[in-house]
Image (tube, grey):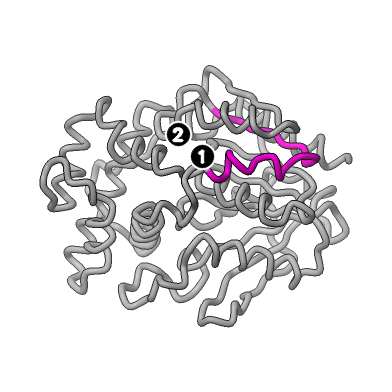
């Protein structure tokens, strides 16, 4: 089994005041004089976990982690329906990342992340290419509307029963194109029972799509959603019902802006939530990227994906 680096605690942490009522949690770990790297978590709304620190060689990296607006330890938390999400968009997150870089006195940094984190890392790098040294991303998605539609509608061909329950949870008519917008409304309902049911239905569908993979999540006891699950579901519905505020296809169209930035794309061929064609298209449009598509891996981590991730980060740490 491929092991990550040993568990490590942050040597510094704080709350970044964005100036608009949001406080974004951040932490740094590893070597204060090491190569700067930013970990961009998935979701939207997943938040960081201690395990995310362990991909970075603590002797070589100054690793920065942060909880995106509304989730994790950032406040206000999206699990509270009173939390206004009008200032929680992709553009706001990109601004937070740049403000955090300036706050920490970092000139340029490596970006790493997966799933939604790959979208956000790519969007940042295309906006601020002069601030990025390398990019290492996995479970690659650019959050095009076509990709979002696959995850929340197209994948139903593999899980028709589970998707029927997911659609029914939105209280929409069959064929309703506003499925995600309906969930976004339910997850802001003042009735906690309605919010909890919607969050549980959302999580159940996401779990179903990944249920064929080793390590897939299940909740057989039917436990109610906690605050983190409520925030995750609400932020996912909020972002994806708006197409992540990205022009359709822009991240692949503008991949030429990444010229000169080395990148590694790690994408399991068995990933049903984010099919491989997106990573393939991105690799073709980004001249300095290398694509690894292990046949034994899906969306979640695997020995193969961990080995590729550690190999890429260790290689870039020496540069």
Quarter of the view holding residue 108: bottom right
Which residue is at the front of the view, 115 or 228? 115
Q: Residue at x 51, y 42 (%)?
A: 249
Tell me the tag on residue 141: 1
Badge 2 marks a residue whose secondary structure is loop
* Quadrant including the N terminus: top right
Q: Position of residue 41 (x, y in %)?
A: 56, 52
Q: Position of residue 317 (x, y in %)?
A: 83, 42
- Relative height, residue 46 to residue 299 (above, below): below
Q: Could one spot residue 53 in this view of the protein?
A: yes
Q: Could one spot residue 7 in this view of the protein?
A: no
Badge 1 marks a residue whose secondary structure is loop
Mark 1 to mark 2 CA distance (whole Å): 6 Å
Please indicate whether residue 183 sits to the left or right of residue 44 in the image: left
Q: Residues within 10 Å of mark 1 (few under 14, many from 20)?
A: many
Q: Position of residue 100 (x, y in %)?
A: 69, 68
Q: Residue at x 23, y 61 (%)?
A: 196
- Relative height, residue 99 to residue 166 (above, below): below
Residue highlighted by disc 2 = 274
Q: State yes or no: discs 1 and 2 in contact (Cβ < 8 Å).
A: yes
Q: Which residues are magenta?
A: 250-267
Q: Position of residue 314 (x, y in %)?
A: 79, 37
Q: Residues within 10 Å of mark 2 (few under 14, many from 20)?
A: many
Asked whether 240 falls inside the magenta stretch, the response is no
């Amino acid at each position: 089994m491929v092991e990550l680096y040993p568990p490590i605690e942050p040597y510094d942490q704080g709350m970044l005041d964005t100036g608009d009522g949001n406080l974004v949690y951040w932490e740094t770990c590893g070597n204060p004089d090491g190569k700067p790297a930013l970990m961009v978590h998935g979701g939207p709304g997943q938040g960081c976990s201690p395990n995310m620190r362990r991909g970075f060689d603590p002797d070589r990296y100054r690793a920065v982690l942060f909880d995106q607006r509304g989730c994790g330890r950032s406040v206000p938390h999206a699990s509270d329906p009173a939390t206004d999400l009008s200032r929680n968009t992709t553009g706001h997150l990109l601004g937070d990342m740049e403000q955090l870089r300036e706050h920490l006195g970092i000139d340029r940094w490596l970006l790493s992340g997966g799933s939604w984190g790959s979208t956000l890392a790519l969007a940042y790098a295309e906006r601020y290419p002069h601030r990025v040294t390398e990019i290492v991303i996995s479970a690659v998605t650019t959050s095009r509307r076509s990709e979002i539609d696959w995850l929340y509608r197209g994948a139903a061909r593999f899980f028709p029963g589970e998707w029927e329950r997911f659609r029914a949870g939105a209280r929409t008519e069959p064929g309703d194109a506003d499925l995600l917008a309906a969930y976004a409304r339910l997850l802001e309902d003042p009735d906690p029972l309605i919010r909890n049911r919607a969050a549980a239905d959302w999580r159940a569908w996401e779990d179903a799509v990944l249920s064929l993979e080793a390590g897939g999540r299940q909740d057989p006891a039917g436990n109610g959603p906690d605050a983190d699950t409520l925030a995750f579901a609400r932020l996912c519905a909020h972002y994806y019902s708006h197409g992540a505020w990205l022009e359709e296809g822009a991240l692949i169209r503008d991949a030429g802006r990444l010229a000169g930035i080395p990148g590694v794309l790690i994408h399991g061929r068995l990933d049903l939530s984010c099919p491989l064609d997106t990573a393939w298209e991105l690799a073709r449009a980004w001249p300095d990227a290398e694509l690894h598509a292990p046949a034994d891996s899906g969306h979640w981590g695997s020995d193969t994906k961990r080995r590729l991730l550690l190999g890429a980060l260790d290689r870039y740490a020496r540069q």
